[in-house]
Amino acid sequence: MKKKQMVILVAVLAALAVVYGALSFVNKKAEEEEKAQEESRVVQVTDLEEIVSFSYEAPEQEALHFEKKKDDWVCVDDEKIELEQTYPNEIVNAFSSLTASRKMEELDALEDYGLAKPAYTVTLQPKDGKEVTVCIGDAVGEEYYLQVKGEDAVYTVTSSVTGVLGHSLEDMEKVEDEEDAEADS
């Protein structure tokens, strides 16, 4: 009798192992499909390499223009200012490889998206390419409407895109720390 119970227990255990394996496989497939769907929803807006200059306009800020000289970004409007390079690099990184969560091709009037008079305008000049201008309009939830000049589509992009544009030239100025100041003395 004990032998029969042991065989039944082993058979039940084997069946449970098979069910567990099958459920794990099904869950893994579902996760892979969900990830693939999520990735397919991301839309590439810009894919630019080696930006040599850019400019931008943002609300309540002066328009700024930057050029790459040797390995550093320089503000064309005031070349005497030494820039903290993380600021212009963040802007270039954000806009040279820009992705959107949605692309709309059947559009209403640009005024409906805040793109007739955009709040933000970013113009990028790649070394070996055509200038690209990105316009950002009204907010929609936690995203903004965006259009690349010359295209008929409007995109929605995360609000972090405008976050990199929220710095004045004064904010971008490199601040000497005490060690640098002492070395200069």
Image (cartoon, rainbow, N blue to C red):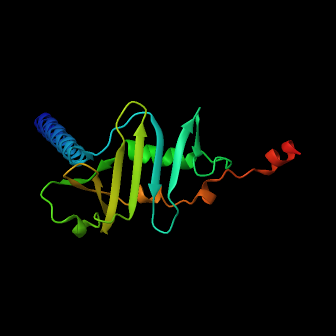
Where is residue 82 drawn, in percent x and y?
A: 67, 47
Quadrant that contains the C terminus: top right
Where is residue 96 drawn, in percent x and y?
A: 39, 42
Residue 73 as seen in the image, left or right of residue 165: right
In the image, 34 versus 97, the foreground residue is 97
From this view, report whether residue 11 is shown above or below residue 57.
above
Residue that lies at the very extreme toward the right in this rendered image? 185
Where is residue 99 drawn, in percent x and y?
A: 31, 47
User: What residue appears at the point 59 percent right and 57 percent down from the top-left corner?
Assistant: 169
Residue 58 as seen in the image, left or right of residue 47: right
From this view, report whether residue 156 is shown above or below residue 128.
below
Which quarter of the picture shows residue 118? Answer: bottom left
Residue 137 as seen in the image, left or right of residue 108: right
In the image, 103 versus 27, the foreground residue is 103
Residue that lies at the very extreme toward the front in this rendered image? 77
Where is residue 156 drawn, in percent x and y?
A: 27, 58
User: What residue appears at the point 10 percent right and 36 percent down from the top-left corner?
Assistant: 4
Number of numbered markers? 0
Quadrant that contains the N terminus: top left
User: What residue appears at the point 31 percent right and 67 percent down from the top-left corner?
Assistant: 138
